[in-house]
Image (cartoon, rainbow, N blue to C red):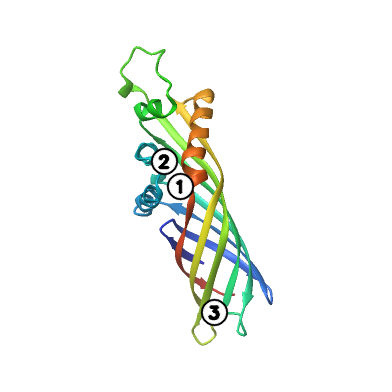
Amino acid sequence: MVGTDFPYQYYAGVSIESNRLGIAYRTGILAPPYSNAVLFSIGALGVDEIYIDILEPAFQFGWMNGINPYIKLGENQLWYAGPEVRFDYLTSSSTSGDLIESVVGTDIFFWDIYDLTQKDVELSLSMIAAGVRAGRKFLLGEKKRHVLKIELSAFKHIYTHSGLTIDEDEAPELNEKLNTLLWEDVFSKYGYLGGLGISYSFSF
């Protein structure tokens, strides 16, 4: 299958089905314009603008993965629904050291005499989310091997972990503070995602 979940990912995947049950695996990317849509959504929920500014570079590209067991419903088994677990990784991108200092209340550059703009501060994120996905199939062609799927999905982040580096060196104590703040102030309260999906599949 190939498809998209608006406003979160573009993906490719495969599913295996029995008479009533199935399981699907999707792998894809988070990329513009979805990147900005996700940040706008969590900002609209109430996330402080300073966190949006910190996260924006990391949200420009991500590797997204989902495992979705489901049950087929209805007389013709065209409807389906089931839980899904997501494992997503947002790649390291340069972010603002000034903003991170403001959030954690620590001068992360106190040992260096150089200008802050000369420091390369990068942030990555590993995230796990759980939720549900439901949809309907539309069978196309004489042999009905071409399948169009329309889906709705909703997820909640249940775990996040940040990876902070300064000039490619790990900063474990600072990262621990930032990781705690990102979870408590952003993802624990506002870490919801999902939306409308559409995909094309070929059935063997």
Percent coordinates x, y for residue 173 in the rendering: 53, 23
At x 35%, y 40%, the residue is 49
Mark 2 — residue?
Answer: 58
Looking at the image, residue 47 sits to the left or right of residue 183; the answer is: left
Toward the bottom, the furthest residue is 142
Mark 1 — residue?
Answer: 62
Looking at the image, residue 71 sits to the left or right of residue 190; the answer is: right
Mark 3 — residue?
Answer: 145
Q: Quadrant of residue 51?
A: top left
Contact? badges 3 and 1 (CB < 8 Å):
no
**Is 38 rendered above or below residue 70?**
above
Work out whether residue 128 or residue 122 is closer to the camera in this orientation and state it.
128
Check disc 2 and report its element: helix, strand or loop. helix
**Is 204 rendered above or below residue 194?**
below
Picture mark count: 3
Work out whether residue 173 or residue 20 is closer to the camera in this orientation and state it.
173
Work out whether residue 110 or residue 51 is closer to the camera in this orientation and state it.
51
Q: Mark 3 or mark 2: name the one nearer the start of the chain.
A: 2
Percent coordinates x, y for residue 146 in the rendering: 50, 78
Q: Amino acid at mark 2?
A: Ala
At x 39%, y 46%, the residue is 46
Percent coordinates x, y for residue 163 in the rendering: 50, 33
Q: Amino acid at mark 3?
A: Arg
Sort mark 3 into few (<14), some (14-19) or many (20+) by Cα contacts within 10 Å: few
Quarter that holds the C terminus: bottom right
At x 63%, y 75%, the residue is 72
Percent coordinates x, y for residue 188 in the rendering: 52, 44
Q: Mark 3 or mark 1: name the one nearer the start of the chain.
A: 1
